Amino acid sequence: MNAPHPGTNLPPGHLPEYPSAAVQGPPEHTGYPGPHVGYPGPQAGYLGPQAGYPGAGPVGFPVQHQPMYNQPGGPAGVPCMPEPPPQLDCPPGLEYLSQIDQILVHQQIELLEVLTGFESNNRYEIKNSFGQRIYFAAEDTDFCTRNCCGPSRPFTMRILDNMGREVMTLERPLRCSSCCCPCCLQEIAIYAPPGVPIGYVTQIWHPCLPRFTIQNERREDVLKIIAPCLLCSCCADVDFEIRSLDEENVVGKISKQWTGFMREAFTDADNFAIQFPLDLDVKMKAVMLGACFLIDFMFFESSGNRE
Protein backbone atom coordinates (compact mmCIF):
# COMPACT_ATOMS: atom_id res chain seq x y z
CA MET A 1 0.00 0.00 0.00
CA ASN A 2 2.97 2.23 0.71
CA ALA A 3 4.77 1.45 -2.52
CA PRO A 4 6.33 4.68 -3.84
CA HIS A 5 6.11 3.48 -7.42
CA PRO A 6 2.63 2.37 -8.48
CA GLY A 7 2.56 -1.14 -9.85
CA THR A 8 5.73 -2.25 -7.99
CA ASN A 9 6.40 -3.98 -4.65
CA LEU A 10 9.70 -2.20 -3.98
CA PRO A 11 10.43 -0.81 -0.53
CA PRO A 12 10.55 2.94 -0.04
CA GLY A 13 13.73 4.60 -1.24
CA HIS A 14 14.53 1.88 -3.73
CA LEU A 15 14.41 2.88 -7.39
CA PRO A 16 13.18 0.46 -10.00
CA GLU A 17 15.68 -1.02 -12.39
CA TYR A 18 14.98 -0.51 -16.05
CA PRO A 19 16.45 -2.64 -18.79
CA SER A 20 19.52 -1.19 -20.45
CA ALA A 21 19.55 -0.14 -24.06
CA ALA A 22 21.42 -3.34 -24.92
CA VAL A 23 18.57 -5.58 -23.74
CA GLN A 24 16.40 -6.64 -26.61
CA GLY A 25 12.63 -6.79 -26.30
CA PRO A 26 10.35 -9.30 -27.89
CA PRO A 27 11.42 -10.71 -31.27
CA GLU A 28 9.03 -8.44 -33.11
CA HIS A 29 10.44 -5.35 -31.34
CA THR A 30 13.91 -4.17 -32.27
CA GLY A 31 14.18 -1.37 -29.74
CA TYR A 32 14.91 2.29 -30.36
CA PRO A 33 16.90 2.73 -33.56
CA GLY A 34 20.14 4.57 -32.93
CA PRO A 35 21.63 7.19 -35.26
CA HIS A 36 21.84 6.08 -38.86
CA VAL A 37 25.26 5.10 -40.05
CA GLY A 38 26.85 7.93 -42.00
CA TYR A 39 24.61 10.64 -40.61
CA PRO A 40 26.57 13.82 -41.25
CA GLY A 41 25.31 15.71 -38.22
CA PRO A 42 24.98 19.48 -38.20
CA GLN A 43 26.38 21.18 -41.25
CA ALA A 44 29.48 23.22 -40.50
CA GLY A 45 29.03 26.88 -41.21
CA TYR A 46 25.25 26.90 -40.91
CA LEU A 47 24.13 30.44 -40.31
CA GLY A 48 20.57 29.73 -39.28
CA PRO A 49 17.61 31.92 -40.16
CA GLN A 50 18.53 35.45 -41.06
CA ALA A 51 15.70 37.52 -39.68
CA GLY A 52 15.12 40.98 -40.96
CA TYR A 53 17.63 40.94 -43.80
CA PRO A 54 15.77 41.90 -46.96
CA GLY A 55 18.19 40.26 -49.36
CA ALA A 56 18.59 36.91 -47.68
CA GLY A 57 15.79 35.17 -49.56
CA PRO A 58 13.52 32.66 -47.80
CA VAL A 59 13.98 32.47 -44.05
CA GLY A 60 16.24 29.66 -42.91
CA PHE A 61 18.51 29.31 -45.91
CA PRO A 62 21.65 27.48 -44.74
CA VAL A 63 25.16 27.98 -46.01
CA GLN A 64 25.47 25.09 -48.40
CA HIS A 65 28.69 23.61 -49.67
CA GLN A 66 27.81 22.89 -53.25
CA PRO A 67 30.17 21.17 -55.69
CA MET A 68 33.02 23.45 -56.61
CA TYR A 69 34.07 24.02 -60.18
CA ASN A 70 37.59 23.36 -61.34
CA GLN A 71 38.58 26.96 -61.65
CA PRO A 72 41.89 28.17 -60.27
CA GLY A 73 41.33 30.18 -57.15
CA GLY A 74 38.07 28.42 -56.28
CA PRO A 75 39.12 26.56 -53.10
CA ALA A 76 36.92 23.77 -51.87
CA GLY A 77 35.09 24.44 -48.62
CA VAL A 78 34.18 28.06 -49.39
CA PRO A 79 30.51 28.51 -48.46
CA CYS A 80 28.29 29.00 -51.48
CA MET A 81 24.94 30.71 -51.70
CA PRO A 82 22.15 28.15 -52.24
CA GLU A 83 20.97 27.98 -55.82
CA PRO A 84 17.53 29.61 -56.12
CA PRO A 85 14.81 28.12 -58.33
CA PRO A 86 14.46 29.31 -61.94
CA GLN A 87 12.38 32.43 -62.47
CA LEU A 88 10.36 33.76 -65.35
CA ASP A 89 11.84 36.68 -67.31
CA CYS A 90 15.23 36.11 -65.67
CA PRO A 91 18.31 34.98 -67.62
CA PRO A 92 19.46 31.57 -66.35
CA GLY A 93 22.06 31.94 -63.64
CA LEU A 94 21.02 35.45 -62.57
CA GLU A 95 18.41 34.22 -60.09
CA TYR A 96 20.95 34.78 -57.30
CA LEU A 97 20.78 38.52 -57.91
CA SER A 98 17.04 38.66 -57.31
CA GLN A 99 17.55 37.78 -53.62
CA ILE A 100 20.27 40.26 -52.64
CA ASP A 101 20.80 44.01 -52.43
CA GLN A 102 24.58 43.97 -52.14
CA ILE A 103 27.48 42.30 -53.95
CA LEU A 104 31.03 41.98 -52.69
CA VAL A 105 33.74 41.65 -55.34
CA HIS A 106 37.10 40.45 -54.03
CA GLN A 107 40.04 40.31 -56.41
CA GLN A 108 42.52 37.54 -55.71
CA ILE A 109 46.19 38.31 -55.12
CA GLU A 110 48.45 36.77 -57.77
CA LEU A 111 51.75 35.91 -56.10
CA LEU A 112 53.58 35.46 -59.42
CA GLU A 113 52.46 38.92 -60.52
CA VAL A 114 53.72 40.45 -57.26
CA LEU A 115 57.13 38.77 -57.56
CA THR A 116 57.77 39.21 -61.28
CA GLY A 117 55.77 42.33 -62.18
CA PHE A 118 54.23 40.61 -65.21
CA GLU A 119 50.50 41.18 -65.46
CA SER A 120 48.40 38.03 -65.10
CA ASN A 121 44.72 37.39 -65.72
CA ASN A 122 42.57 38.96 -63.02
CA ARG A 123 40.35 36.67 -60.97
CA TYR A 124 37.58 37.63 -58.58
CA GLU A 125 35.29 36.00 -56.07
CA ILE A 126 31.79 37.49 -56.06
CA LYS A 127 29.91 37.07 -52.79
CA ASN A 128 26.80 38.19 -50.96
CA SER A 129 26.92 40.16 -47.71
CA PHE A 130 27.22 36.93 -45.67
CA GLY A 131 30.40 35.88 -47.45
CA GLN A 132 28.67 33.17 -49.46
CA ARG A 133 30.09 32.87 -52.94
CA ILE A 134 27.71 33.60 -55.81
CA TYR A 135 30.03 33.68 -58.81
CA PHE A 136 33.65 33.41 -59.81
CA ALA A 137 35.00 35.79 -62.46
CA ALA A 138 38.10 35.15 -64.56
CA GLU A 139 39.72 37.38 -67.16
CA ASP A 140 40.54 35.75 -70.49
CA THR A 141 43.26 37.65 -72.35
CA ASP A 142 46.66 36.70 -73.75
CA PHE A 143 50.04 37.57 -72.27
CA CYS A 144 50.99 40.19 -74.86
CA THR A 145 47.69 42.07 -74.56
CA ARG A 146 47.91 42.21 -70.78
CA ASN A 147 51.50 43.40 -70.61
CA CYS A 148 51.53 45.72 -73.63
CA CYS A 149 48.21 47.50 -73.11
CA GLY A 150 48.20 47.47 -69.31
CA PRO A 151 45.01 48.70 -67.58
CA SER A 152 43.64 49.97 -70.92
CA ARG A 153 43.65 46.49 -72.41
CA PRO A 154 40.58 44.95 -73.99
CA PHE A 155 39.39 41.86 -72.15
CA THR A 156 36.80 39.16 -71.93
CA MET A 157 35.58 38.45 -68.42
CA ARG A 158 33.85 35.12 -67.90
CA ILE A 159 31.57 34.81 -64.87
CA LEU A 160 30.74 31.30 -63.67
CA ASP A 161 28.28 30.14 -61.06
CA ASN A 162 29.08 27.66 -58.27
CA MET A 163 28.46 24.71 -60.60
CA GLY A 164 31.00 25.94 -63.15
CA ARG A 165 28.45 27.18 -65.70
CA GLU A 166 29.26 30.39 -67.54
CA VAL A 167 26.27 32.61 -66.82
CA MET A 168 27.68 35.98 -67.89
CA THR A 169 30.30 37.30 -70.29
CA LEU A 170 31.73 40.82 -70.22
CA GLU A 171 33.42 42.30 -73.28
CA ARG A 172 35.56 45.44 -73.15
CA PRO A 173 36.90 46.67 -76.51
CA LEU A 174 40.17 48.54 -76.89
CA ARG A 175 39.52 52.25 -76.42
CA CYS A 176 41.57 55.35 -75.71
CA SER A 177 42.03 56.09 -72.02
CA SER A 178 42.44 59.85 -72.48
CA CYS A 179 39.52 62.20 -71.82
CA CYS A 180 40.83 64.37 -74.68
CA CYS A 181 39.33 61.92 -77.19
CA PRO A 182 35.55 62.12 -76.74
CA CYS A 183 34.97 60.03 -79.85
CA CYS A 184 36.61 56.92 -78.39
CA LEU A 185 35.46 56.54 -74.79
CA GLN A 186 35.44 53.46 -72.60
CA GLU A 187 32.68 50.89 -72.84
CA ILE A 188 31.79 47.41 -71.63
CA ALA A 189 29.05 45.07 -72.85
CA ILE A 190 27.30 42.52 -70.61
CA TYR A 191 25.89 39.27 -72.00
CA ALA A 192 23.68 36.84 -70.05
CA PRO A 193 23.63 34.10 -71.09
CA PRO A 194 26.79 34.42 -73.23
CA GLY A 195 25.92 35.84 -76.63
CA VAL A 196 22.71 37.55 -75.49
CA PRO A 197 23.25 41.26 -74.63
CA ILE A 198 21.42 42.56 -71.56
CA GLY A 199 23.10 45.94 -71.14
CA TYR A 200 26.03 48.27 -71.64
CA VAL A 201 28.10 50.73 -69.62
CA THR A 202 29.46 53.66 -71.62
CA GLN A 203 31.65 56.53 -70.52
CA ILE A 204 30.30 60.07 -70.84
CA TRP A 205 32.80 62.72 -71.85
CA HIS A 206 33.49 65.21 -69.06
CA PRO A 207 36.58 67.42 -68.60
CA CYS A 208 36.88 66.69 -64.87
CA LEU A 209 34.60 64.00 -63.50
CA PRO A 210 34.44 60.40 -64.72
CA ARG A 211 30.83 59.67 -65.64
CA PHE A 212 29.12 56.64 -67.10
CA THR A 213 25.71 55.71 -68.43
CA ILE A 214 24.05 52.37 -67.73
CA GLN A 215 22.04 51.22 -70.74
CA ASN A 216 19.65 48.33 -71.34
CA GLU A 217 19.90 45.80 -74.15
CA ARG A 218 18.36 48.31 -76.61
CA ARG A 219 21.04 50.88 -75.67
CA GLU A 220 18.49 53.08 -73.95
CA ASP A 221 19.84 55.11 -71.03
CA VAL A 222 18.59 53.85 -67.67
CA LEU A 223 20.93 55.14 -64.94
CA LYS A 224 24.08 57.20 -64.49
CA ILE A 225 27.27 56.62 -62.51
CA ILE A 226 28.94 59.70 -61.01
CA ALA A 227 32.51 59.48 -59.71
CA PRO A 228 33.93 61.72 -56.96
CA CYS A 229 36.27 64.59 -57.77
CA LEU A 230 39.23 62.83 -56.15
CA LEU A 231 39.83 59.14 -56.76
CA CYS A 232 42.52 58.84 -54.08
CA SER A 233 41.85 55.73 -51.99
CA CYS A 234 44.28 56.43 -49.14
CA CYS A 235 42.70 55.20 -45.88
CA ALA A 236 39.15 55.59 -47.17
CA ASP A 237 36.64 54.08 -49.55
CA VAL A 238 35.94 55.64 -52.94
CA ASP A 239 32.24 55.78 -53.79
CA PHE A 240 30.83 55.91 -57.32
CA GLU A 241 27.19 56.91 -56.93
CA ILE A 242 24.52 55.34 -59.13
CA ARG A 243 21.85 57.92 -59.83
CA SER A 244 18.73 58.43 -61.87
CA LEU A 245 19.05 60.02 -65.30
CA ASP A 246 18.23 63.47 -63.92
CA GLU A 247 20.90 62.90 -61.24
CA GLU A 248 18.43 63.84 -58.51
CA ASN A 249 18.00 60.46 -56.83
CA VAL A 250 20.74 58.12 -55.61
CA VAL A 251 19.84 54.54 -56.51
CA GLY A 252 22.96 52.77 -55.25
CA LYS A 253 26.73 52.93 -55.31
CA ILE A 254 29.89 51.09 -56.27
CA SER A 255 32.51 51.43 -53.54
CA LYS A 256 36.19 50.69 -53.90
CA GLN A 257 37.11 49.56 -50.39
CA TRP A 258 40.33 50.45 -48.60
CA THR A 259 42.32 47.24 -47.95
CA GLY A 260 45.38 48.50 -46.05
CA PHE A 261 48.72 50.09 -46.87
CA MET A 262 50.61 46.89 -47.74
CA ARG A 263 48.02 45.48 -50.10
CA GLU A 264 47.29 48.83 -51.73
CA ALA A 265 50.98 49.65 -52.24
CA PHE A 266 52.28 46.32 -53.53
CA THR A 267 49.35 44.71 -55.33
CA ASP A 268 46.53 45.72 -57.63
CA ALA A 269 44.07 43.33 -55.97
CA ASP A 270 41.02 45.38 -55.00
CA ASN A 271 37.82 44.85 -53.06
CA PHE A 272 34.53 46.40 -54.15
CA ALA A 273 31.01 46.56 -52.77
CA ILE A 274 27.98 47.19 -54.98
CA GLN A 275 24.70 48.32 -53.42
CA PHE A 276 21.34 48.54 -55.20
CA PRO A 277 17.62 48.21 -54.42
CA LEU A 278 16.46 44.67 -53.73
CA ASP A 279 13.63 44.95 -56.27
CA LEU A 280 15.82 46.31 -59.09
CA ASP A 281 15.73 44.38 -62.35
CA VAL A 282 18.31 41.58 -62.20
CA LYS A 283 19.62 42.62 -65.61
CA MET A 284 20.48 46.07 -64.29
CA LYS A 285 22.14 44.47 -61.27
CA ALA A 286 24.28 42.41 -63.63
CA VAL A 287 25.15 45.53 -65.65
CA MET A 288 26.25 47.25 -62.43
CA LEU A 289 28.56 44.31 -61.81
CA GLY A 290 30.03 44.88 -65.26
CA ALA A 291 30.46 48.57 -64.42
CA CYS A 292 32.44 47.56 -61.33
CA PHE A 293 34.99 45.68 -63.45
CA LEU A 294 35.30 48.58 -65.90
CA ILE A 295 35.90 51.01 -63.01
CA ASP A 296 38.51 48.68 -61.52
CA PHE A 297 40.51 48.51 -64.75
CA MET A 298 40.22 52.21 -65.50
CA PHE A 299 41.17 53.66 -62.10
CA PHE A 300 42.58 51.01 -59.74
CA GLU A 301 44.33 48.36 -61.81
CA SER A 302 47.76 49.99 -61.59
CA SER A 303 49.25 49.89 -58.08
CA GLY A 304 51.06 53.15 -58.79
CA ASN A 305 47.76 55.07 -58.98
CA ARG A 306 46.50 54.21 -55.51
CA GLU A 307 47.77 56.83 -53.14
Image (spheres, rainbow, N blue to C red):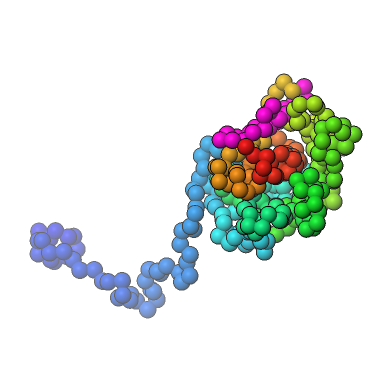
Q: Could you tell me which quadrant the C terminus lies in?
A: top right
Nearer to me, 226 or 164: 226
Residue occupying image coordinates x 75% and y 31%: 210
Extreme residue toward the bottom, this view = 27
Write down the quadrant of residue 217 in the picture: top right
Would residue 192 be visible to someone looking at this image? no
Quick check: 303 above or below 229? Answer: below
- Percent x, y for residue 199? 81, 40
Nearer to me, 189 or 47: 189
Give the magenta part as a residue range. 226-246
Nearer to me, 48 or 142: 142
- Percent x, y for residue 62? 54, 51
Look at the magenta stretch and give its main secondary structure.
loop
- Percent x, y for residue 52? 53, 36
Q: Could you tell me which quadrant the N terminus lies in?
A: bottom left
Nearer to me, 96 or 147: 147
Quick check: 191 above or below 250? Answer: below
Would residue 209 be visible to someone looking at this image? yes
Quick check: 12 above or below 105? Answer: below
Magenta highlight on residue 131 = no
Write down the quadrant of residue 67 in the picture: bottom right
Residue occupying image coordinates x 37% and y 78%: 27
Residue occupying image coordinates x 68% and y 61%: 71
Extreme residue toward the right, this view = 183
Magenta highlight on residue 240 = yes
Residue occupying image coordinates x 58% and y 50%: 132
- Percent x, y for residue 8? 17, 65
In the drawing, does residue 189 fall left or right of residue 77?
right
